Image: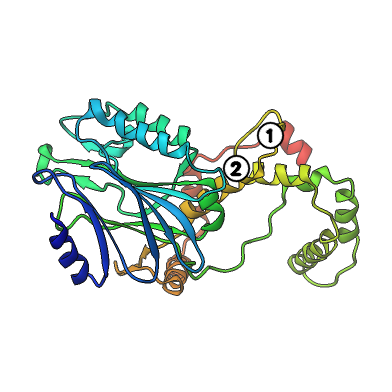
């Protein structure tokens, strides 16, 4: 693709500006297009990488568009270019690396009856670690490339990815990466959206491990639990939780508490608390929340829904369908069904202790 072809293609898609690295035959080639809503500065370009700096009214970050070398034994040269580029960046600069890496990371990233080899995966795993990058968890289709062959000759791989720095995760915790279906090419496109999506309902109440480090924790819980509320057991329990929450607001957050908080949220078990880099724990937590976000769901009628309200309604409909079933079971039938599950049983000592 030459410059003029790139401009025509960008114009057809509604974009005013473009830059490109020409393909070699039918493979490779990089094209970056943008409109007047952002400012794009090209730092460097070659057949495998385009480094650009993007800014608008709210954001400023680096983007590296990648095409991994098609030859396995030469891919390390592209990874080394990324490591060299990282050395010129400040730790607090936001950076995204995205595109076709031409390399799987794990055995689960490849589906093939003929070839299960993932040679080169170890070198790619080392690259994000050296660059202090974490993967942006994707939603949608898992595999991003196919050889478009049928039956046992078919191969599917996940080789298109997006990695980002901890600084980027801190400022774009609501971002979502969508893997789109493979339709016209051997690759499926992906879309990285940094706009905040409409959220679900408020998160449920959870006890945080950091509270145990505060000497007032026990007094706060006792004061809340000693309140005399009238009503059903469930109502009384909820009221005590609300009271405890009000009192807890008085607890001052200190560095030790904040660190343990993010350690728990990141689900990483550390033996020593020596590193107070809470930004790292925050980035890990943000990645987990992106991964856990539900961006689409099939309804009971097989329709794909992506709007947040429709996703909520699909969940409600599903559980209503389960709990509104009119099947009536007599006690004997119910007992047999439970027994068939072979549930664990209490021994004599446990039964005596409970009584």
Q: Quadrant of the C terminus?
A: top right
Q: Which mark is residue 11?
A: none
Q: Quadrant of the N terminus?
A: bottom left
How far apart are the two marked residues, 2 and 1, measured between alpha carbons?
Answer: 10 Å
**Circle 1 — which element?**
loop
Provide residue 336's location: percent of width, then percent of height: 48, 48
For the point 77% across and 42% down, the residue is: 256
Provide residue 299's location: percent of width, then percent of height: 35, 68
For the point 26% across and 38% down, the residue is: 68
**Circle 2 — which element?**
helix
| Residues at circles 2 and 1 in contact by the CB criterion of under 8 Å | yes
Residue that badge 2 annotates: 280
Given residues 231 and 73, the one toward you in this image is 73
| 342 relative position to 37: left or right | right
| 93 relative position to 258: left or right | left
Indicate which disc, 2 or 1, sits on the residue closer to the N terminus.
1
Provide residue 301's location: percent of width, then percent of height: 30, 70
User: Looking at the image, is 110 positioned above or below residue 197?
Assistant: above
| 299 relative position to 17: left or right | right
Given residues 235 and 309, the one toward you in this image is 309
Number of numbered discs: 2
Provide residue 293's location: percent of width, then percent of height: 47, 58
Given residues 327 and 20, the one toward you in this image is 20
Residue that badge 1 annotates: 275
């Amino acid at each position: 693709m030459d410059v003029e072809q790139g401009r025509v293609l960008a114009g057809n898609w509604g974009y005013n500006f473009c830059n490109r690295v020409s393909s070699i035959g039918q493979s490779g080639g990089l094209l970056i297009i943008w409109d007047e809503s952002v400012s794009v500065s090209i730092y460097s370009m070659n057949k495998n990488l385009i480094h650009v700096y993007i800014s608008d009214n709210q954001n400023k970050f680096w983007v590296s568009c990648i095409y991994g070398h098609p030859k396995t034994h030469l891919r390390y040269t592209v990874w080394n270019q990324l490591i060299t580029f990282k050395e010129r960046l400040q730790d607090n600069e936001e950076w995204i690396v995205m595109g076709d890496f031409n390399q799987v990371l794990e055995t689960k990233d490849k589906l093939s009856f003929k070839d299960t080899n993932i040679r080169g995966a170890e070198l790619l795993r080392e690259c994000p670690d050296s660059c202090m990058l974490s993967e942006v968890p994707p939603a949608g289709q898992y595999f991003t490339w196919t050889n478009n062959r049928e039956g046992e000759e078919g191969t599917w791989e996940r080789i298109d990815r997006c990695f980002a720095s901890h600084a980027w995760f801190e400022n774009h915790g609501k971002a979502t990466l969508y893997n789109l279906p493979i339709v016209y090419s051997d690759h499926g496109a992906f879309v990285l959206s940094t706009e905040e999506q409409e959220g679900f309902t408020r998160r449920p109440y959870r006890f945080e491990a950091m509270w145990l480090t505060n000497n007032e924790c026990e007094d706060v819980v006792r004061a809340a639990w000693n309140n005399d509320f009238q009503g059903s057991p469930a109502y009384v329990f909820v009221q005590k939780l609300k009271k405890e929450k009000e009192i807890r607001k008085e607890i001052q957050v200190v560095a030790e508490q904040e660190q343990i908080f993010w350690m728990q949220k990141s689900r990483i078990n550390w033996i020593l608390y020596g590193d107070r880099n809470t930004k790292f724990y925050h980035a890990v937590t943000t990645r987990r929340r992106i991964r856990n976000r539900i961006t689409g769901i099939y309804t009971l009628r097989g329709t794909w829904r992506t709007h947040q309200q429709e996703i909520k309604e699909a969940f409600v409909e599903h559980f209503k369908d389960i709990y509104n079933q009119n099947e009536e079971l007599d006690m004997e039938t119910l007992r047999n069904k439970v027994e068939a599950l072979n549930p664990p049983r209490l021994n004599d000592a446990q039964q005596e202790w409970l009584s």
